[in-house]
Amino acid sequence: MAEPSPETLETFENPFPERNYLIETVAPEFTSLCPKTGHPDFGTLTITYIADKLCYELKSLKLYLQEFRNHGAFYEKVTNTILDDLVAVTSPRWMKIEAAFTPRGGIRTTVIVEHGKKPE
Amino acid sequence: MAEPSPETLETFENPFPERNYLIETVAPEFTSLCPKTGHPDFGTLTITYIADKLCYELKSLKLYLQEFRNHGAFYEKVTNTILDDLVAVTSPRWMKIEAAFTPRGGIRTTVIVEHGKKPE
Amino acid sequence: MAEPSPETLETFENPFPERNYLIETVAPEFTSLCPKTGHPDFGTLTITYIADKLCYELKSLKLYLQEFRNHGAFYEKVTNTILDDLVAVTSPRWMKIEAAFTPRGGIRTTVIVEHGKKPE
Amino acid sequence: MAEPSPETLETFENPFPERNYLIETVAPEFTSLCPKTGHPDFGTLTITYIADKLCYELKSLKLYLQEFRNHGAFYEKVTNTILDDLVAVTSPRWMKIEAAFTPRGGIRTTVIVEHGKKPE
Amino acid sequence: MAEPSPETLETFENPFPERNYLIETVAPEFTSLCPKTGHPDFGTLTITYIADKLCYELKSLKLYLQEFRNHGAFYEKVTNTILDDLVAVTSPRWMKIEAAFTPRGGIRTTVIVEHGKKPE
Amino acid sequence: MAEPSPETLETFENPFPERNYLIETVAPEFTSLCPKTGHPDFGTLTITYIADKLCYELKSLKLYLQEFRNHGAFYEKVTNTILDDLVAVTSPRWMKIEAAFTPRGGIRTTVIVEHGKKPE
Amino acid sequence: MAEPSPETLETFENPFPERNYLIETVAPEFTSLCPKTGHPDFGTLTITYIADKLCYELKSLKLYLQEFRNHGAFYEKVTNTILDDLVAVTSPRWMKIEAAFTPRGGIRTTVIVEHGKKPE
Amino acid sequence: MAEPSPETLETFENPFPERNYLIETVAPEFTSLCPKTGHPDFGTLTITYIADKLCYELKSLKLYLQEFRNHGAFYEKVTNTILDDLVAVTSPRWMKIEAAFTPRGGIRTTVIVEHGKKPE
Amino acid sequence: MAEPSPETLETFENPFPERNYLIETVAPEFTSLCPKTGHPDFGTLTITYIADKLCYELKSLKLYLQEFRNHGAFYEKVTNTILDDLVAVTSPRWMKIEAAFTPRGGIRTTVIVEHGKKPE
Amino acid sequence: MAEPSPETLETFENPFPERNYLIETVAPEFTSLCPKTGHPDFGTLTITYIADKLCYELKSLKLYLQEFRNHGAFYEKVTNTILDDLVAVTSPRWMKIEAAFTPRGGIRTTVIVEHGKKPE
């Protein structure tokens, strides 16, 4: 499998750009590698956004997320990187990612990042 | 079955127009077809609104939603279209639709659209 | 059983009128008849209020709600009527009723009505 | 879409015929039409079996079940028919289908059919 | 509404009499009156049976159960009576009714009655 | 309140003695006192039985259980005593009591006692 | 057991008075008597507060709440009284009590009282 | 704290030795140390038994289990040891321990040990 | 990462071979590749066994299961293979694996395989 | 094990200091000793913060929290102390700790402390 690259992400035109509406995508099968131990990490990504001109296409999002399968990255880094990639490709009015990882050593971590200010 | 048409929707007079009150309708048996693959999609629609002069009649809403059974439409399109149709027929003071679709490829999507500004 | 009448409702003096506090009553065994089909409807009423001088007495509330057992009324009508009756009898500072009915034809409806503005 | 036909079902060779083991398939997106009213029915099928020489292929099972989408059939009939079709195509050592349908008129029905005697 | 009578129950021919299979019907909106206090009782009936030549028709079952709405009967009596009526009309190979009533005075009761011996 | 006494328990004639059927009573508001510390204990009693000639009356059961409110008794003792009292008064074909107490010192206890052998 | 008295309540010095922080105490084993019927009531108290100079000591809170065991009081009265007692003894910056009682006659009640304005 | 020793366990006479009844004790706050890493392990112990002449006293059980707090032991060892100790002290007719440990490295383990044959 | 090999699995001596006791290991982070599409599959493995002379060591089990991460295998094949490998290495008195995979195309599959006959 | 000391805590550089984002860490295996009774306390810590220049390293956090294992501290004290230590080491823009302890004497306590004002 390839390394994660925003070029994998495809978009389509927002069919209702005149309306501020929410799209929420839940991807519970995210997995990457811990750069320190090499062991797999697992988590659930919840991506919520208000599109401007472009929406990401779901199948390409799935392929993009699969590219992290054999990629080493810390929780904080991987979540911010995915946000940056999705923002670069879709230029949304607002976007938030909540990444909830499964427990390690009895402790579990969630990272929540946001781009822009949510329109009321 | 016929194609989806707002003409299927019937209305009745709001019995308490002097009060801003919420009506919430949950339709967990919504199904349409994916326009790309032809496979069925399934979801739960939650429609919430504050009626002005008219309420939609529940049996006609059910028939209207059933008309999507053999109709091809993307998540974002179908949700916005249903909102537009319900708004056209009932002219509510405020309306919101939350459409939660079942997972495809391990990923699930929810689309949330809103018409007007909810009165306090 | 008698027809629904606010006269069934009894009250007692609010023991702490100097304080704005919430009383919440959940009645999950509400049933009335559908005026169109004659079939029974079932729902859960959640009544929340801030009393002024009077509280409703719980046993009389139960008897009042039982009077709807063989009474025909649409969801929107019955919820607004119960609010009007309770307001007429207790003159609360604020009151809200949330009526969640069980599914019919795969669709379920909740009606939420409010009287006055909730004090902060 | 075509009418339901066992010919849609494809099989593959049981990779471990020397062992009696269970395969359970849960299909929560089954839908057909009520032959009396024409309205859609919805249900979850749980198919459990011990294969002999053949297993059904999952994608073809999905297509076979989709063929019921515009097909009229009562609960008892449709469940027995699916069992008969799957048995005809795979000749399992044992098979059970539990079909749990969503409520209609406040009443919900489950049909449980079995073929053969489960080996201990 | 009429008094409960087995004559309300309609049947149809068991479409697969050569197979011993289970039909389970869950009716969560059962209500009758307490013969001592006149107050309504509420419960969920779960009827499970193996039909012989006849199945009960679901709409007629619903109407039959609605006839208990203004009928006074103790928990033990009403459950045994419904079993007797359903057995009289359908002559099943085996039938079980589990009637779970809602709490009264902080105590809740379930009555479980059975007709015949369940075939293996 | 009085001390617990089987004389508080009233019975009525089993309306269907020709049938072995189950009656289950769940009493989640049982409370007694710890004889060692004097602090209250709390638990949920689940009584299941097959009546012979007599059933216990529910209101009298409630009063009987309330008599333990200021009575000191260990878990094992109180559960066996209630079984003995109920058996003495109703002479059932079979009876079981499961008493699940709330945690003390982070540990929770359940006592399960049975009278007779459950008829098949 | 003694009658409820705020004198049972003991306090200790708030170890971090320079910080506005929340302490939440959940007591699910509260019981008192209904003054009308003499029957026991059961409920869960959730007490949340921001201490000023004093915190209540947990063991003494438990003993204070146990003093209601054989004390008659209506829901609204008992909740307000406990708030008044705790405020009198600890003079908190802010305090809230939510008392959720178990159902009686199929209806359950929650009373929510508050002292002071919660600091942001 | 001391090392785990069966001498910490105290017993009392079974108040109903003439009856085979179950006592179930759930201790969700068990913790010991991993002998390999020195890190703490956590688990829930469910002990079920039929006493003969002696029952273990709950407070002494709690103290006995606390003695494992700084004691190193593998899952399989610790569970079998506790069973042996409890059997040695109470000589039960039958006893079972289910020890469910929290996940380590994404994997969780449960050990289930039994002494004697459960009487019917 | 290496290809799956039973040589990764390490064992230790069963500390209580004189007792038939159960060890249950739940591994919810299993992932492999679909040999047809190349897309990842995800599932939860529940392994239960009664050891004879040897137990598998948990850390080596984790490493063994991780070796399936980039390995293509169908559900039925992968489950039977893991059972065969674990049996080869530990020669248990009895072993069962339940592999519950996440939904694909709205359908989810569980495979349950067993080795030997569970001793009573 | 050592006494709790902030020196155990290690940090790493916040990889995205230009963004205000949330990191939430849930540690459900926290245990300390009650200073009055010497008995163990158990709780779940939820730490949420917005890092400035430094993040705490998870493994060192785990070791730091383990140092409370044989340390005596009251609920309010231990929660405020952990907040102070984490703030001293990471100087976050905002931090909150919610410590939910398991029930003692039927009563459970949660302490919620906050440092700084959460940026919008």
Image (tube, coloured by chain):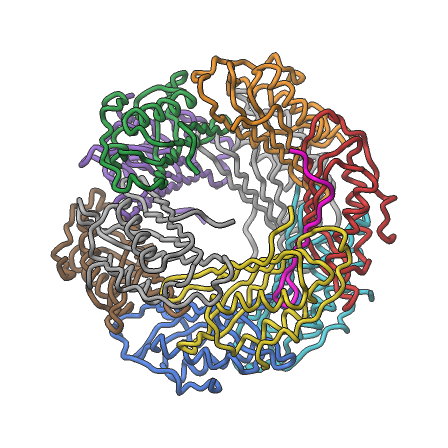
Chain colours: A orange, B green, D purple, E brown, F blue, G yellow, H cyan, J red
Q: Is residue J115 left or right of residue D109?
A: right
Residue H104 visible in rendering: no
Name the foreground residue: H14 vs J115: J115
Using the image, determine if residue J48 lies above or below residue A47: below
Q: Quadrant of residue B32?
A: top left
Where is residue A108 shown, x and y percent of the image?
68, 41
Query: Residue at 57% across / 19% down in the picture?
Result: A63
Pick the quarter of the image with the N terminus of chain A.
top right
Using the image, determine if residue H21 lies above or below residue B55: below
Query: Residue at 79% across / 51% down in the picture?
Result: J81
Using the image, determine if residue G87 lies above or below residue A99: below
Give yes or no for residue J108 being in the magenta stretch.
yes
Name the foreground residue: B31 vs E98: B31
Q: Quadrant of residue G4?
A: bottom right
Q: Is residue F90 left or right of residue H34?
A: left
Look at the image and give the residue range highlighted in magenta. J100-120
